[in-house]
Structures are given as structure tokens and as C-alpha cells.
Image: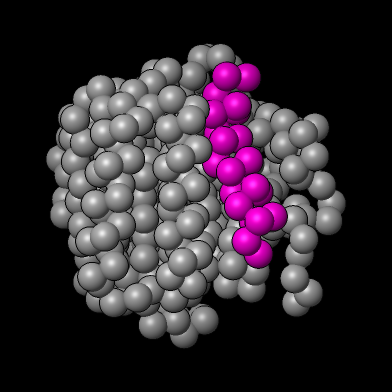
Amino acid sequence: MKQLNRLPLVYSPAYSIPWDPKHRFPMAKYRLLYEHLHHCGLAHQRNTFMASPCSREQLLRGHSAGYVDAFLGGTLDQESLRQLGFPWSTALVTRACTAVGGSIATAQMALRHGLACHLAGGTHHALRDSGRGFCVFNDLAVTALALLQENRLGRVLILDCDVHQGDGTALILADEPRAFTCSLHGANNYPFDKPCSDLDVPLPDGLDDHGYLAVLEQTLRLLERQPRPEIILYDGGSDVHRDDRLGRLALTDEGIRQRDWRIFAWAHQQQIPLACYIGGGYDHDHQRLILRHALLVETASRFFQQHY
């Protein structure tokens, strides 16, 4: 494939489905983020690739057949839906499958171009047998398994910098030695029962830019001691921001920019392709929220222009 001169983005209008405006999950943020990036000139037809739904077979690499078929067929019980946090609909099925397909496509783009960004993804709380925490399927785990099996990669690193621990990812990939899971997360934040990732880095409430970036540098040095991965799946959640209503950390816009830039620079120095996922972010004001999510894409675009 011809090398792009702009950061490749993956998106689908299916990501923002008709939604109760009173619901806690900001479903409109995906559409609003794309519109913002398009208005800024960062997303256009030449660098935005439309996601397609993943296959059932791909989902079964990370999830049980019972759960996948119950969700696809609309037969999940009420307790399962309560744990998930979403009301079931055919639109939600399309959205969930397309988002996983988009995450896989983003990784494929990163393998071709060095760096790519998904305008969704990071649904790291979904477990093998159930969804929870607003995560239907675990796109990071399913993508890692797709890369290992379909692309025959030998090693994948999942670097999860969402403020919430990647518990589902850790559990699904616990017995897969070719996938290394690393999670930097709020020690006192959801989920409150945290299974072991391959490397967990718990962070205290109120940690600021300086403290966070120091911990990140230490974490990258630890990762250098591991066998070199062939790709990094990076969950760059904006919920580490000091104004995020669920975050409990204290990073500024500039702190998030530096977090992302340092990770991009580290991956580039190591010559490892990197796929970005926007992860979590929560604010009743959707316009403020999309500006925080856009930091990841803006920084990735600037880095791509300078280094690829």
C-alpha cells in the first residue's frame, strides 16, 4: 500500500447510535469527535477509512460462544444487561461489531504505515463470558488475538493508559504468552477487584503531569526489558484528565499531549508500529470531552507528519 502523507484514521457513523441523552455513557462523542477533526482538517476522505463489522469467528477468539451468540441474538438476561450498562438493540449489535472491526483495521493500518488511530476502541472491561462497564466486546484482546493468528505475529504489547485498569484484557489474555498486557491506572478507581496484568502500575489519586510522566518513563524502561513486540495497541484514554468526572487524576491538556508524544517517540525509537484507541472519557459537556479526546489524534497527527 502507498504510504500516506497524513495519519490514517478509522471511523464509522455506526459508532454513535440513537441514544437516551440522560444515559451516563456519552454515545454521541464518536460522531462529535469525527466532526471536530474534520472541521480542523485532520480527518478527510484521503486518510479516514470506514470500519466494517468483525466476524463472529474473530469474536470467538476472545469471547465464549454462549455470550457472543446471546448478545448477537438479543437473548442476554436482565442482569447481564445491567452489568453491561447498555440497553440491547440491533443498532448496538452493529455498533459493537463494527467497533471491534475498526480496532482490528487500525492495527492493520499501523502495521502498514507505522502509526494509526481509531476514533473509538479501548473497551477493556469486557470479559470472556460477559460485557460490563459499558464494554460489549473486548476489542483490544480480540485485536491482539487476530494479529497473532491472522497476521502470524509473534508478540503483541497492549499498553493501556486509560485511568481504569484493563481488567478484561488481562483476564482474556492471561494464558496467551505472546500478548503482554501493561496497565497504568488509578489505584482507587474502577474496577475495584483488579486481576493481574503482566505489568500493573497503580497510580494515586490526584497525580499530576510531572508525577505521571515520571512513572510513565519508568514503565517504558521496564517494558524495554521484555521481548520486543511487533506491534503496540495503545489505549490513550482521556479520562486521566483533571476535569474528567470519573478520573480522579490531575493531568492537564499539556500533560496528556506529553504522555502521548513520549509513547509515540518510544515506539518509533524501538521501530514498533503503534495503533491508538481513544479509550474512556467522561464529561456532561460533550464539547469539552471531544476536545480532550482530540488531544490524542492531534498529537499523533503531528508526530506522524514529522516522523513517517
Report x, y in % for residue 213.
33, 40
Where is residue 307? Give x, y as percent.
62, 61
Quadrant showing the N terminus? bottom right
Does the magenta segment cover residue 290?
A: yes
> What is the chief secondary structure element of the magenta stretch?
helix
Q: Residue at x 45, y 35 (%)?
A: 256
Q: Can residue 109 be seen in this view?
A: no
Looking at the rendered structure, the number of numbered marks drawn on it comes to 0
Q: What colour scheme was applied to this rendering of the protein?
A: one colour
- Most foreground residue, 145 or 163: 163
Q: In which quarter of the image is the C terminus?
A: bottom right
Q: Is residue 224 visible?
A: yes
Which residue is located at x 44 percent, y 81 percent? 153
- Front residue of 100/77: it is 100
Residue range (magenta): 287-308
Residue for point 22% across, 61% down: 222
